[in-house]
Image (cartoon, grey):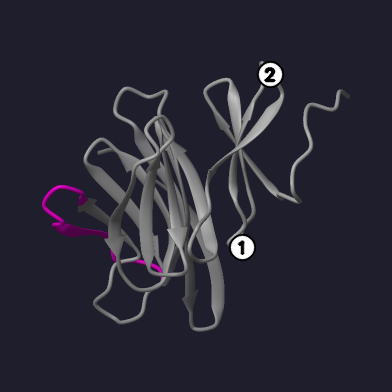
Protein backbone atom coordinates (compact mmCIF):
# COMPACT_ATOMS: atom_id res chain seq x y z
CA UNK A 1 0.00 0.00 0.00
CA UNK A 2 1.40 3.34 -1.07
CA UNK A 3 0.16 6.76 0.09
CA UNK A 4 -0.59 8.79 -3.03
CA UNK A 5 -1.93 12.10 -1.72
CA UNK A 6 -3.77 13.76 1.16
CA UNK A 7 -7.31 15.03 0.77
CA UNK A 8 -9.71 17.12 2.83
CA UNK A 9 -11.88 14.35 4.24
CA UNK A 10 -13.35 13.25 0.89
CA UNK A 11 -15.28 9.97 1.14
CA UNK A 12 -15.81 9.11 -2.55
CA UNK A 13 -13.42 8.49 -5.43
CA UNK A 14 -14.25 8.15 -9.13
CA UNK A 15 -11.83 7.15 -11.88
CA UNK A 16 -11.21 9.74 -14.60
CA UNK A 17 -8.85 8.63 -17.36
CA UNK A 18 -5.71 7.65 -15.40
CA UNK A 19 -6.54 10.06 -12.58
CA UNK A 20 -9.26 10.44 -9.94
CA UNK A 21 -12.07 12.72 -8.88
CA UNK A 22 -12.44 13.10 -5.10
CA UNK A 23 -15.82 14.11 -3.66
CA UNK A 24 -18.16 13.60 -0.72
CA UNK A 25 -21.76 12.39 -0.97
CA UNK A 26 -24.42 14.63 0.64
CA UNK A 27 -21.94 17.46 1.06
CA UNK A 28 -21.16 20.81 -0.53
CA UNK A 29 -17.46 20.11 -0.07
CA UNK A 30 -14.98 20.98 -2.85
CA UNK A 31 -14.79 18.59 -5.80
CA UNK A 32 -11.13 17.73 -6.40
CA UNK A 33 -8.93 16.30 -9.15
CA UNK A 34 -6.06 13.97 -8.22
CA UNK A 35 -3.30 13.85 -10.84
CA UNK A 36 -1.64 10.45 -10.39
CA UNK A 37 1.54 11.47 -12.23
CA UNK A 38 2.32 14.34 -9.86
CA UNK A 39 0.26 13.12 -6.86
CA UNK A 40 -1.14 16.66 -6.63
CA UNK A 41 -4.73 17.43 -5.68
CA UNK A 42 -6.39 20.48 -7.23
CA UNK A 43 -9.84 22.02 -6.92
CA UNK A 44 -12.23 21.49 -9.83
CA UNK A 45 -15.16 23.42 -8.35
CA UNK A 46 -17.10 24.14 -5.18
CA UNK A 47 -20.77 23.15 -5.42
CA UNK A 48 -23.42 25.68 -4.38
CA UNK A 49 -25.42 22.98 -2.55
CA UNK A 50 -24.97 19.40 -1.37
CA UNK A 51 -23.95 16.86 -4.03
CA UNK A 52 -26.14 13.77 -3.91
CA UNK A 53 -24.46 11.76 -6.65
CA UNK A 54 -21.57 12.19 -9.09
CA UNK A 55 -20.70 10.13 -12.19
CA UNK A 56 -17.87 10.42 -14.70
CA UNK A 57 -19.34 10.45 -18.23
CA UNK A 58 -16.57 10.82 -20.79
CA UNK A 59 -14.98 14.27 -20.36
CA UNK A 60 -17.76 15.48 -18.07
CA UNK A 61 -18.78 15.01 -14.46
CA UNK A 62 -22.54 14.66 -14.07
CA UNK A 63 -23.80 15.44 -10.60
CA UNK A 64 -27.03 15.98 -8.69
CA UNK A 65 -27.19 19.09 -6.59
CA UNK A 66 -29.84 18.77 -3.90
CA UNK A 67 -32.60 16.41 -5.06
CA UNK A 68 -33.79 18.16 -8.19
CA UNK A 69 -30.99 19.63 -10.32
CA UNK A 70 -28.61 17.73 -12.61
CA UNK A 71 -25.49 19.55 -13.80
CA UNK A 72 -22.50 18.70 -15.96
CA UNK A 73 -18.97 19.97 -15.37
CA UNK A 74 -16.48 19.75 -18.22
CA UNK A 75 -13.20 18.70 -16.59
CA UNK A 76 -11.00 20.29 -19.29
CA UNK A 77 -12.76 23.65 -19.79
CA UNK A 78 -14.38 24.04 -16.37
CA UNK A 79 -17.75 24.83 -18.01
CA UNK A 80 -20.81 24.10 -15.90
CA UNK A 81 -24.26 23.48 -17.41
CA UNK A 82 -27.70 22.80 -15.92
CA UNK A 83 -28.99 19.72 -17.77
CA UNK A 84 -32.25 18.89 -15.98
CA UNK A 85 -34.51 20.01 -13.18
CA UNK A 86 -37.13 17.63 -11.81
CA UNK A 87 -38.42 16.12 -8.61
CA UNK A 88 -36.85 13.31 -6.58
CA UNK A 89 -33.73 12.80 -8.74
CA UNK A 90 -31.62 9.87 -7.51
CA UNK A 91 -28.92 9.40 -10.20
CA UNK A 92 -28.03 10.53 -13.73
CA UNK A 93 -25.63 9.61 -16.55
CA UNK A 94 -24.87 11.40 -19.81
CA UNK A 95 -24.37 9.72 -23.18
CA UNK A 96 -23.98 12.11 -26.11
CA UNK A 97 -26.95 14.50 -26.11
CA UNK A 98 -29.02 12.17 -23.92
CA UNK A 99 -29.22 12.44 -20.16
CA UNK A 100 -30.66 9.39 -18.36
CA UNK A 101 -32.23 10.14 -14.99
CA UNK A 102 -33.25 7.75 -12.19
CA UNK A 103 -36.03 9.13 -10.01
CA UNK A 104 -38.14 8.22 -7.03
CA UNK A 105 -41.76 8.25 -8.15
CA UNK A 106 -43.97 11.01 -6.84
CA UNK A 107 -47.22 10.09 -8.62
CA UNK A 108 -48.91 7.14 -10.29
CA UNK A 109 -48.23 8.44 -13.80
CA UNK A 110 -44.55 9.28 -13.20
CA UNK A 111 -41.65 7.27 -14.59
CA UNK A 112 -38.73 6.22 -12.41
CA UNK A 113 -36.33 6.29 -15.39
CA UNK A 114 -36.39 9.02 -18.05
CA UNK A 115 -34.33 10.18 -21.03
CA UNK A 116 -33.81 13.92 -21.53
CA UNK A 117 -32.56 15.42 -24.79
CA UNK A 118 -30.10 18.02 -23.47
CA UNK A 119 -30.54 20.25 -26.53
CA UNK A 120 -34.36 20.29 -26.84
CA UNK A 121 -35.16 19.42 -23.18
CA UNK A 122 -37.67 16.80 -24.42
CA UNK A 123 -38.24 14.26 -21.63
CA UNK A 124 -39.29 10.69 -22.46
CA UNK A 125 -40.43 8.20 -19.78
CA UNK A 126 -38.65 4.86 -20.12
CA UNK A 127 -39.77 2.82 -17.09
CA UNK A 128 -43.15 2.82 -15.37
CA UNK A 129 -42.64 -0.22 -13.14
CA UNK A 130 -41.36 0.12 -9.60
CA UNK A 131 -41.48 3.10 -7.32
CA UNK A 132 -37.86 4.20 -7.58
CA UNK A 133 -34.77 3.79 -9.73
CA UNK A 134 -32.01 4.35 -7.24
CA UNK A 135 -28.83 4.12 -9.28
CA UNK A 136 -27.53 4.12 -12.84
CA UNK A 137 -24.33 2.97 -14.50
CA UNK A 138 -23.15 3.69 -18.06
CA UNK A 139 -21.20 0.93 -19.81
CA UNK A 140 -19.01 3.08 -22.05
CA UNK A 141 -17.06 0.00 -23.19
CA UNK A 142 -20.07 -1.30 -25.13
CA UNK A 143 -20.58 0.16 -28.62
CA UNK A 144 -24.15 1.22 -27.78
CA UNK A 145 -23.39 2.62 -24.28
CA UNK A 146 -25.79 0.38 -22.36
CA UNK A 147 -27.36 1.97 -19.29
CA UNK A 148 -27.77 -0.31 -16.27
CA UNK A 149 -29.79 0.52 -13.18
CA UNK A 150 -31.59 -0.80 -10.15
CA UNK A 151 -35.32 -0.33 -9.74
CA UNK A 152 -37.04 -0.81 -6.37
CA UNK A 153 -40.51 -2.29 -5.94
CA UNK A 154 -42.88 -2.14 -2.98
CA UNK A 155 -46.10 -3.96 -3.78
CA UNK A 156 -48.38 -5.01 -0.93
CA UNK A 157 -45.53 -4.38 1.54
CA UNK A 158 -43.32 -6.88 -0.35
CA UNK A 159 -40.08 -5.08 -1.13
CA UNK A 160 -37.83 -6.24 -3.95
CA UNK A 161 -35.43 -4.87 -6.54
CA UNK A 162 -34.40 -5.66 -10.10
CA UNK A 163 -31.41 -4.77 -12.23
CA UNK A 164 -32.34 -3.42 -15.65
CA UNK A 165 -30.42 -2.93 -18.90
CA UNK A 166 -31.41 -0.19 -21.34
CA UNK A 167 -29.87 -0.23 -24.82
CA UNK A 168 -30.21 3.26 -26.32
Q: Based on the picture, tell me whether residue 123 belongs to the magenta stretch.
A: yes
Give the image location of residue 48, x and y in percent. Answer: 48, 63
- The residue that mark 2 highlights is 38
Q: Where does the N terminus fall, quadrant-wise?
A: top right
Callout 1–callout 2 Cβ contact below 8 Å: no
Q: Residue shown at 29%/28% (left/top)?
A: 144
In this rendered view, identify the residue nearer to me: 149 or 157: 149
- The residue that mark 1 highlights is 27
Q: Where does the C terminus fall, quadrant-wise?
A: top left
Q: Is residue 102 above or below residue 16?
A: below
Q: Based on the picture, tell me whether residue 151 belongs to the magenta stretch.
A: no
Disc 1 element: loop
In this rendered view, identify the residue nearer to me: 108 or 34: 34
What range is drawn magenta here? 117-130
Give the image location of residue 9, x and y in percent. Answer: 76, 51
- Give whichever of discs 1 and 2 has the lower sequence position: 1
In this rendered view, identify the residue nearer to me: 136 or 162: 136
The answer to whether any part of residue 166 appears in the image is no
Amino acid sequence: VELVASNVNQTNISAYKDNFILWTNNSAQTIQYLNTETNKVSTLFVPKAKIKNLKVCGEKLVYIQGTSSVYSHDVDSGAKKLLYTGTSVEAAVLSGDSLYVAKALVGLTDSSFVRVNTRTKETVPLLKRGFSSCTLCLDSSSPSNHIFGIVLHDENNAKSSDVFDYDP
